[in-house]
Image: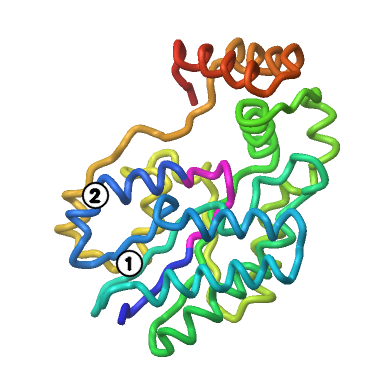
Amino acid sequence: MPRRIILHAGFHKTGTSSIQATLRENRVALKKQVALRLRWHLKDIVVAARGYSTDLDPLTLIKVQSRFGEMVNALPGMPRRTLIISAEELSGHLPGRGPLADYSAAPVLLYAYWEILRSAYPEAEILIYLTTRAPDAWLASAYWEHVKSSGMTMNYDVFEHTYAGAANLDGMVAEVASRVPAPVTAQRLEDCVDLPLGPADPLLDLCDIPLSVRAELQAVPPANQRHDPEVLNALLDINRTHTDITARNAAKKALLSSTKGHA
């Protein structure tokens, strides 16, 4: 049984990809202290969580609970280790597409995960860890992520006005803390810029890792960085000029294959 469980469930565009990449890169060094279940281990769960966030259907929530429970039941013994479960989509879809206006599904989903973990590991300490970002920076990052990964065509100022409420991540942290009976810790991405392992450092601080092990951990380049403005605008233009999804995706793939992201 793990002695501590840290549930890192987002939010999107707050350094989550970099956190997961750092944990994966250092999994061998951390294996005596930390067990990992990252986004690529949780594919079926996040598909259901995304579905629940968009339809709020109780039957979809049951699917989330069933899949999360199956994952927990399949975990090996982890005596004296900290179990980190990290995937931003455990909180549902990234808000900003269609009617999905915010993270209102997150407290319900996090309560469901907490309840299952508490039942499986009644003696383990269960913590919820949430990463956040300044509202303006989050809105811009969310907008361009939608432009890159979907057929979004709206102007940024329209997006900003329509989905401004979703950017109140601090408010959602407070909402989660008020509705899930577990300690909730939050960390802003902007406060992690100068840390040796970036946004992964505050999460690892919760794991009681010996200093000798921390000193061995390797930093990784920031993951999922935003592209240059000219590339982003070219992606937006592709969305506006290609009505066929296959042609649109092919044009985007060709463009992105010749470019690299920037912070």
Q: CA distance from mark 2 to mark 1?
A: 14 Å
Q: Nearer the viewer, residue 36 or 210?
A: 36
Residue identifier under label 2: 26
Q: Amino acid at mark 2?
A: Asn
Name the residue nearer the viewer: 229 or 210: 229
Rate crowding at label 1 as few (under 14), some (14 to 19) or many (20 or more) other CA atoms within 10 Å: some
Q: Is residue 122 left or right of residue 187?
A: left
Q: Residue at x 75, y 18 (%)?
A: 243
The magenta region covers 8-16
Q: Which residue is mark 1?
A: 207
The verdict on residue 10 being magenta is yes
Q: Residue furthest bottom?
A: 123
Residue 85 in the image: above or below residue 152: below
Per the picture, the main secondary structure of the magenta-coloured stretch is loop
Figure quadrant of the N terminus: bottom left
- In front of the other: label 2 or label 1? 2
Report crowding for label 2: few under 14, some 14 to 19, many 20 or more residues within 10 A (C-alpha): some
Q: Amino acid at mark 1?
A: Cys
Residue 33 coordinates in the image, percent (x, y)? 23, 67
Residue 135: image quadrant is top right
